[in-house]
Amino acid sequence: MATLHAAYALLSLAPLLVVSDPPVVYTQPEQVHLSYPGVPGSMVVTWTTFNSTDSLVEYSPWGGRLFDESAQGSATLFVDSGSEKRKMYIHRVTLSDLKPGSRYVYHCGSEMGWSDMFWFKPLDHTSTSPSFALYGDLGNENPQSLARLQKETQTGILDAILHIGDFAYDMHEDNARVGDEFMRQIQSIAAYVPYMTCPGNHEATYNFSNYRNRFSMPGQSESLWYSWNIGPAHIISLSTEVYFYLEYGQELLFRQYEWLKRDLEEANKPESRAARPWIITMGHRPMYCSDDDQDDCTTFDSFIRRGRNDTKPPAPGLEDLFYLHGVDLELWAHEHTYERLWPVYGDKVYNGSTEDPYTNPKAPVHIITGSAGCRERTDKFNPNPKDWSAFRSTDYGYTHMQVVNRTHVYLGQVSDDQSGKVIDSIWIVKEKHGYDAWL
Ligand SMILES: [Fe+2]
């Protein structure tokens, strides 16, 4: 009878035992994603296991003998700060000497378990016309644009994806299981093209530790800020969150600002700007927006735009820095809408001309694209936008960007609500780049 009772007791516990955690020994790789480390001919493969294993990638050119080449990397132990202190191993392997233009197949893992097989095209840093999808604010629930992005990515039309902050909603939740689920969900895109990121406010918990540990962006700032080159573009990724989470270190704000200044000076050296005339920034919270909320970008004294006076010393904003260094295009998210701005500086519109506002504009162009889809749904607009607001949409969707050549950039907004219809598009045409272009 005692045995029977014990059996019943076990049975009644059974539902509790079936949780989403992997078994005690779990060495199967998952959450595979790519990033570009900024070195031509290279690619970083990042993935997760829940027990310690080697970190190997086996790969080969498409059509060749499978897995002829292999590369080894290393794993770091990430202990989430939630109550369960869940552990995971984040593996990073850098592939080098890849030949641009040819497609590679790969899998990752170790002799204790291999991933599915994926493919990618090495980024051709000399590519004349790189294509991107960009968006922010994509979550696990209601990720409305994801299916379209999966299909587009796998058809091979994108060179890279820029995710402009706010992931998963939120990665730390349920002891970081929401982060795991998000990374599994985006594997269908991020295992095929470099998935380049910047942090948003939804990553802030435990000092952005899920973000800092799970992604592998170039540079030494734990993916918080960095820059990279592709074709005729220099792309700068930054953390707008350093202006808001001073509890994690006010010095971060100043360190980033100094880094941005140096990076922009370097990118503006005549030889740099001649090779890469387009300077494009991406950061989560915009300087300007016309949403019907109380966000920073709705205020004239936006922290991002004008800085903060309540810090010691006062913290400089980004608008003057970007303007003075001739940033051409600024990509933002956070507002769960799409908004295109006329060229703007100091709250004033500086169109190239009345007929062709984006031909030789006299100030940077801003795009806000935060409507990929998440549990918070889309936002509403203020009914009376300011003069700099050129086009607005509350449809779910994302943005296509192609840096076509030294003088032309294309931007188009894809509405997922309207079955992929391009609801807004512009060409930015610039014969001249840099601060002098404004004059
Ligand atoms: Fe946000």
Image (cartoon, rainbow, N blue to C red):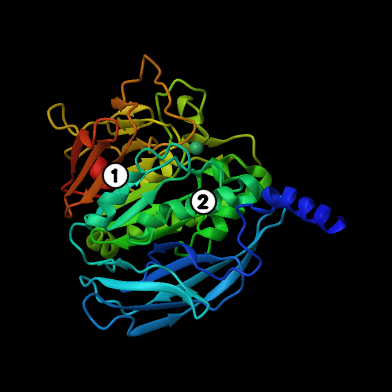
Q: Considering the image in quadrants, where does the C terminus appear? A: top left
2 with respect to 14 (left or right): right
Give coordinates of residue 331: x percent, y percent: 36, 42
Q: Quadrant of residue 247?
A: top right
Residue at the limit of the structure toward the front, as seen here: 1
Report crowding for label 1: few under 14, some 14 to 19, many 20 or more residues within 10 A (C-alpha).
Answer: some
Amino acid type, label 2: Glu
User: Is disc 2 placed on a helix, strand or loop?
Assistant: helix
- Write the residue at 24% across / 34% down: 419
Relative height, residue 418 to residue 127 (above, below):
above
Q: Which residue is mark 1?
A: 148
Report crowding for label 2: few under 14, some 14 to 19, many 20 or more residues within 10 A (C-alpha).
Answer: some
Q: Which mark is residue 181?
A: 2
Residue at the limit of the structure toward the top, as seen here: 383
Relative height, residue 304 to residue 436 (above, below):
above
The count of marks equals 2
Res. 63 in view: yes
Amino acid type, label 1: Arg
Asked if the residue at label 2 sits under 8 Å from ligand 1, the reply is no
Q: CA distance from mark 2 to mark 1?
A: 19 Å
Marks 2/1 in contact by CB < 8 Å: the verdict is no
User: Is disc 1 placed on a helix, strand or loop?
Assistant: helix
- Write the residue at 55% across / 41% down: 201
Give coordinates of residue 385: x percent, y percent: 35, 19
Give coordinates of residue 57: x percent, y percent: 42, 76
23 with respect to 361 (left or right): right
- Write the residue at 40% across / 63% down: 35
Q: Quadrant of residue 68?
A: bottom left
Relative height, residue 406 to residue 60 (above, below):
above
Q: Considering the image in quadrants, where does the N terminus appear? A: bottom right
